[in-house]
Structure formats: C-alpha cells, structure tokens
C-alpha cells in the first residue's frame, strides 16, 4: 500500500481502515488473531511503527485487544463508542499515557488537604506539585478525561516546563530524575462527576463518571507521584484478562 496523495490520509489511518473493513466483513471474525506485525509490515510496505499506530487505532475503537506475546485479537466487528483501556502490566499502563496528550491548564505547588492526602498517602499540609488539565486522544479529536497529577516536591524543579511538554508526567520524572518507577497501583470507583471537572469536560454537573486513582512508587515503596483521572461513565470501558495460575486452598 503506497502513498497515493495527501487526500488518502496518513498511511497508518489507511491501514487501520483496511483492517477495520476486513473485520467488518468477517475476514477476521471475533476471536481470530490478526496477522503478525511482521506480516502486516510486508503486506502494506510499512514500518513497524506505522503498523503499531494502525493497530492502536483499532484498539481505540474497541475492535481489537492487544496483549504481549499473544498478538492482536478481534473482540468486536463494529466500532464501539468511548475509550478503551487494557492493562496487563506496567508497560501497558505506561503505553496508555504515551498514546495520549495532556493539556495542562494549571500548574503549581500546593499544600495538600485531607482528600489529596488520601490520594498521595502523605501528611495533610505537605507540599506537592499539582498539574491539572484534560487528556486528549493522540489525534486531539476527543477528550478522554480530566486529570489531576500530584508530584512529590523533590521533582518540582524538573517540571517547570510541563505546560509546554504535555506528555506523560511519569516519563518526565523518570527521565529527568534518574529514579525508576518500580511499582504502580490503580483504584477504580464509580462517582458523580464534580462540578469543576464537569465544566472542563463539558458535561452536566453530577454526570456518572469513573474515577481512576493511580499511584507510582519508587524502589523503596515511597510515592513519587499520583494521578486522579475522571472519565465520563458512558465513554469508559476497562478490560482485564486473568490467567489461571496456581490454585490455593
């Protein structure tokens, strides 16, 4: 599949459309595994990066589930509304942040209150760097969620340009501090959307929402940063797959 002019669109989008049509028509039925990245690279005369971008678009549409070592599995024949998250390990959680863009609308040091202290597991009144804004899809064609990120004060001098960078905050912390995120946790709860969040996401006050609280820990178990992510309920689908392990009584 060679470029046929700007009107054809980016190659990754054309590949995604071609694969989506094959899924829709039953060439790749639900439960089937798509051809490997290597095979798709050869078929479409595209780089591995381009193929991965095309497959990511299918994941975003709820058509395909990608898992390390298992390839890309078809899970639906028609595009699903909303934004899907499929996490298997830390790498998957990190990939999610890399595939989106955070527009930071507020950035500054705060003294945390009781609610935030619960998120970051730190004393009330301690100082943390807070960044808030809307996370968008990579194409910037849809809002995903409203995010509040709380970063330990020792990293604050490294993030003065966060408004301009707009990428994954954890990545900047790791790259600029030299410290490694050894573990992450995630809590999910269904809650009414707070008024301030609803204004940013252009939703009615009290709209049903899913709140994701993520915490990132260093090798000693201390929290490096935490984020609170508010997703509109109707746009959120979270998928897990559990493998059978050693059964215990």
Image (spheres, rainbow, N blue to C red):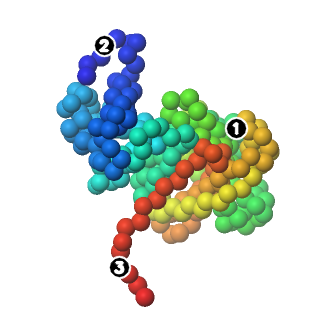
Q: Toward the viewer: 194 or 30?
A: 30
Report which residue position mark 3 lands on.
246
Please rate how many residues cluster around mark 3, counting C-alpha atoms within 10 Å: few if below 14, some from 14 to 19, many from 20: few
Residue 85: x percent and y percent? 50, 49
Residue 105 in view here: yes
At x 54% / y 43%, what residue is drawn? 83
Q: Secondary structure at mark 2?
A: loop
Residue 23: x percent and y percent? 35, 37
Is there CB contact under 8 Å for labels 2 and 3? Answer: no
> Does 6 sit above or below residue 111?
above
Q: Secondary structure at mark 3?
A: loop
User: Quadrant of residue 190 in the image?
Assistant: bottom right
Name the residue furthest front. Answer: 25
Is there CB contact under 8 Å for labels 1 and 2? Answer: no
User: Quadrant of residue 47 in the image?
Assistant: top left
Please rate how many residues cluster around mark 2, counting C-alpha atoms within 10 Å: few if below 14, some from 14 to 19, many from 20: few
- Work out how far the residue at label 1 is from the one at label 2, CA to CA, in angstroms: 38 Å
At x 40% / y 12%, what residue is drawn? 7
At x 38% / y 22%, what residue is drawn? 10
User: Quadrant of residue 235 in the image?
Assistant: top right
Report which residue position mark 2 lands on.
4
At x 54% / y 50%, what residue is drawn? 237
- Work out how far the residue at label 2 is from the one at label 3, CA to CA, in angstroms: 53 Å
N-terminal of the pair, mark 1 or mark 2, is: 2
Left or right, 128 with respect to 31, comes to right
């Amino acid at each position: 599949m060679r470029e046929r002019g700007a009107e054809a669109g980016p190659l990754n989008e054309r590949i995604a459309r071609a694969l989506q049509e094959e899924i829709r028509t039953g060439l790749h039925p639900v439960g089937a595994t798509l051809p490997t990245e290597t095979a798709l690279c050869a078929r479409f005369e595209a780089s591995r990066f381009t193929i991965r971008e095309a497959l990511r678009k299918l994941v975003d549409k709820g058509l395909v589930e990608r898992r390390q070592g298992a390839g890309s599995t078809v899970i639906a024949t028609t595009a699903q509304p909303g934004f899907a998250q499929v996490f298997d390990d830390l790498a998957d959680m990190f990939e999610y942040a890399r595939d989106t863009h955070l527009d930071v609308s507020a950035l500054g040091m705060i003294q945390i209150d009781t609610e935030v202290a619960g998120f970051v597991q730190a004393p009330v009144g301690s100082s943390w760097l807070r960044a808030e804004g809307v996370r968008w899809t990579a194409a910037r064609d849809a809002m995903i969620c409203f995010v509040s990120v709380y970063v330990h004060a020792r990293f604050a001098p490294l993030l003065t340009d966060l408004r301009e960078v707009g990428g994954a905050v954890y990545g900047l912390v790791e790259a600029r501090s030299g410290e490694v995120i050894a573990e992450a946790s995630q809590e999910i709860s269904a809650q009414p959307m707070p008024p301030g969040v609803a204004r940013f996401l252009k939703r009615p006050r009290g709209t049903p929402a899913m709140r994701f609280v993520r915490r990132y820990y260093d090798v000693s178990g201390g929290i490096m940063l935490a984020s609170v992510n508010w997703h509109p309920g109707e746009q959120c689908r979270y998928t897990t797959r559990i493998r059978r392990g050693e059964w215990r009584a």
